[in-house]
C-alpha cells in the first residue's frame, strides 16, 4: 500500500499547482469548467425542446452571440487595467452566473438571443485573465506547464458537468433543462468565490489606466505578434473539427455506427487530461513553442488524410481509422494549446500583457464564429474538401516556421531576452533548443 502511495501522490501533484493559491486556482478552474460542461451538454437540448427554437433560430442566435463576444473581447479585457486581472476574472464569473440564470428562463427567440449574447460576452476575457492570474501565482518560468495543468483539469470539469447533466436530460422536462443551466450558474459563482480566496494578486502595471488605448496601437503595429495570433487562430479550428467536422464525416461519409462518436469524444477528453501537462512541460522557449504549433499543423493535416481513408474502408477498419484520426486531432489540439499559451505570453511585453493577450484571444474567437460554417461546407465536398483542408494545414505549418523564426530573432520588440531564453531545469528534454 505504501508503494502505491508514492506514485499516486506524484500523479496527483502533476495536476496541481504549487502552493495554497495554486490549489485554489485548480479548484476554481474545475468549477468553472463544470459549469461549461453543464451548458454544453444541456444548452442546445433546452433551446430546441424547452424554448422550441427552430434550427435556423438557434444558429442565428448563437451567431449573434458569438459576434457580440468577439467585438467585446478586447474592451472587456481592458477593464483589467482598472480592476486588475484577478478582480476582473471574478467579475466575469459572476457575469456568467447571472447570464446563465437568465438564460434558463428565456422563453422565446428574442430573450434567448439577448441572454446567450450576454453569456458569450463573458467568454473572451476568461483565458487571458487566467493566464495573468496563473503567472502572478507561479511566476513566468513555470507558466506554460501550469497552463497545461489548467487545460487538463478544465477537461476534467467539463466531463463532470456533462455527466451531471445526464439525469436532468433524462427527465425530458422544461424544469429539468432549466436546472442544468442553474447548476452551471452556481458553479460559476463557486469559481468566483474560490478566486476570491487567493492571496497573490497580479498587479496592474503602472500607468496602465491612462495608456491602454496607446497599448492597443502598439499591438496593432507588432506584425509578428499579429501573425502569431492569426496562425494560432487558424489552428484553433481543431475545436470545430471535433464538434462539427468529425460527427458530420462519421455519419455522412463512413459506415461506422453513429454511437461511435460518443466513444471518440470520450477518447479525446481522456487523452487531453492525461497528456496535456506532458506536452506543455516540454516547451521551454520560443523555438519550442513555434515548433509545437508547426507539429500541430502537420498533426491536423494527418487527421484529414486518415479521415479520407476512413471513407474508403469497411467495418472494423473504419472504426480503427476513426480512432486513429481522433488521436491525431487530439495531438493537434494539445500542441496548439501549449504552443499558443507559451508564445502569446512570452512575446507580450510585461507592461502590455493585458493588451497583447486580449488581442491574441481574438484569433480563437474569430475561428469559433466562422469555423462551423466553413467546416460544414468542406465536409459536404467529401474527399476533395478534406484534401484541400489537409493542404491548408500543411501550408499553415510552413508559415508557422517563418513566424517562429521572426519571433525568436534577437532584439525584436515583444521578445525580451529574459523571456525567450531558458533551458529545462529538471532534466526533461524540450521540443527544441531555444537560442533566442
Image (cartoon, rainbow, N blue to C red):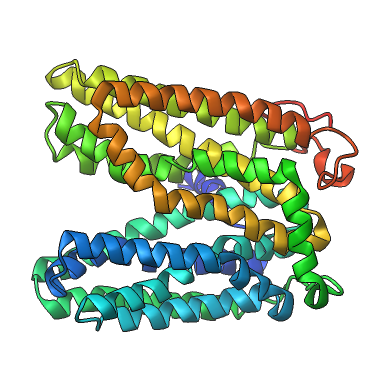
* Residue 392 on image: x %, y %: 47, 27
Residue 203 found in image quarter: bottom right
User: 239 or 63: which is nearer to us?
Assistant: 63
Whether residue 429 is visible, yes or no, is no
Residue visible at 56% across and 80% down in the picture: 91
- Above-or-below relation of 218 to 375: below
In screen coordinates, is 298 left or right of 412? left
- Above-or-below relation of 195 to 246: below
* Residue 193 on image: x %, y %: 53, 81
Residue visible at 22% across and 38% down in the picture: 248
Image quarter of the C terminus: top right
User: Could you tell me how many numbered marks the image carries?
Assistant: 0
In screen coordinates, is 397 left or right of 385? right
Residue visible at 73% across and 41% down in the picture: 224
Residue 56 found in image quarter: bottom left
Residue 422 found in image quarter: top right
- Above-or-below relation of 102 to 352: below
In screen coordinates, is 183 left or right of 279? left
In screen coordinates, is 195 left or right of 405? left
* Residue 134 on image: x %, y %: 66, 61
Whether residue 434 is visible, yes or no, is yes
Amino acid at each position: 500500500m505504501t508503494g502505491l502511495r508514492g506514485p499516486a501522490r506524484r500523479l496527483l501533484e502533476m495536476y496541481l499547482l504549487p502552493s495554497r493559491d495554486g490549489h485554489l486556482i485548480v479548484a476554481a478552474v474545475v468549477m468553472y469548467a463544470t459549469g461549461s460542461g453543464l451548458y454544453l451538454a444541456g444548452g442546445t437540448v433546452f433551446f430546441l425542446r424547452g424554448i422550441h427554437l427552430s434550427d435556423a433560430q438557434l444558429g442565428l442566435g448563437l451567431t449573434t452571440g458569438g459576434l457580440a463576444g468577439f467585438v467585446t473581447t478586447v474592451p472587456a479585457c481592458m477593464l483589467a487595467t482598472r480592476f486588475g486581472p484577478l478582480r476582473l476574472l471574478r467579475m466575469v464569473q459572476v457575469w456568467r452566473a447571472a447570464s446563465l440564470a437568465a438564460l434558463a428562463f428565456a422563453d422565446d427567440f428574442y430573450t434567448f438571443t439577448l441572454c446567450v449574447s450576454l453569456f458569450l460576452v463573458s467568454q473572451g476575457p476568461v483565458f487571458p485573465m487566467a493566464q495573468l492570474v496563473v503567472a502572478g501565482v507561479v511566476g513566468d518560468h513555470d507558466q506554460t506547464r501550469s497552463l497545461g495543468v489548467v487545460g487538463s483539469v478544465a477537461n476534467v470539469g467539463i466531463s463532470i458537468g456533462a455527466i451531471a447533466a445526464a439525469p436532468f436530460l433524462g427527465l425530458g422536462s422544461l424544469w429539468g433543462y432549466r436546472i442544468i443551466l442553474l447548476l452551471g450558474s452556481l458553479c460559476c459563482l463557486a469559481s468566483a468565490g474560490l478566486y476570491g480566496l487567493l492571496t497573490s494578486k497580479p498587479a496592474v502595471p503602472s500607468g496602465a489606466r491612462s495608456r491602454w488605448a496607446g497599448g492597443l496601437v502598439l499591438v496593432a503595429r507588432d506584425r509578428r505578434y499579429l501573425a502569431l495570433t492569426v496562425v494560432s487562430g487558424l489552428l484553433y479550428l481543431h475545436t470545430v473539427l471535433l464538434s462539427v467536422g468529425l460527427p458530420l464525416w462519421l455519419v455522412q461519409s463512413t459506415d461506422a455506427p453513429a454511437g461511435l462518436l460518443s466513444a471518440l469524444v470520450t477518447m479525446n477528453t481522456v487523452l487531453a487530461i492525461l497528456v496535456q501537462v506532458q506536452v506543455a512541460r516540454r516547451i521551454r522557449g520560443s523555438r519550442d513553442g513555434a515548433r509545437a504549433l508547426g507539429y500541430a499543423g502537420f498533426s491536423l493535416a494527418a487527421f484529414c488524410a486518415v479521415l479520407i481513408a476512413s471513407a474508403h474502408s469497411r467495418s472494423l477498419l473504419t472504426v480503427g481509422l476513426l480512432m486513429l484520426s481522433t488521436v491525431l486531432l487530439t495531438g493537434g489540439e494539445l500542441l496548439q494549446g501549449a504552443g499558443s499559451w507559451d508564445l502569446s505570453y512570452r512575446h507580450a511585453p510585461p507592461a502590455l500583457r493585458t493588451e497583447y493577450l486580449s488581442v491574441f484571444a481574438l484569433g480563437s474567437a474569430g475561428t469559433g464564429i466562422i469555423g462551423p460554417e466553413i467546416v460544414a461546407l468542406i465536409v459536404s465536398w467529401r474527399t476533395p474538401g478534406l484534401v484541400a483542408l489537409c493542404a491548408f494545414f500543411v501550408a499553415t505549418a510552413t508559415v508557422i516556421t517563418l513566424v517562429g523564426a521572426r519571433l525568436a530573432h534577437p532584439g525584436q520588440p515583444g521578445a525580451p531576452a529574459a523571456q525567450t531564453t531558458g533551458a529545462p531545469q529538471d532534466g526533461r528534454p524540450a521540443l527544441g533548443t531555444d537560442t533566442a
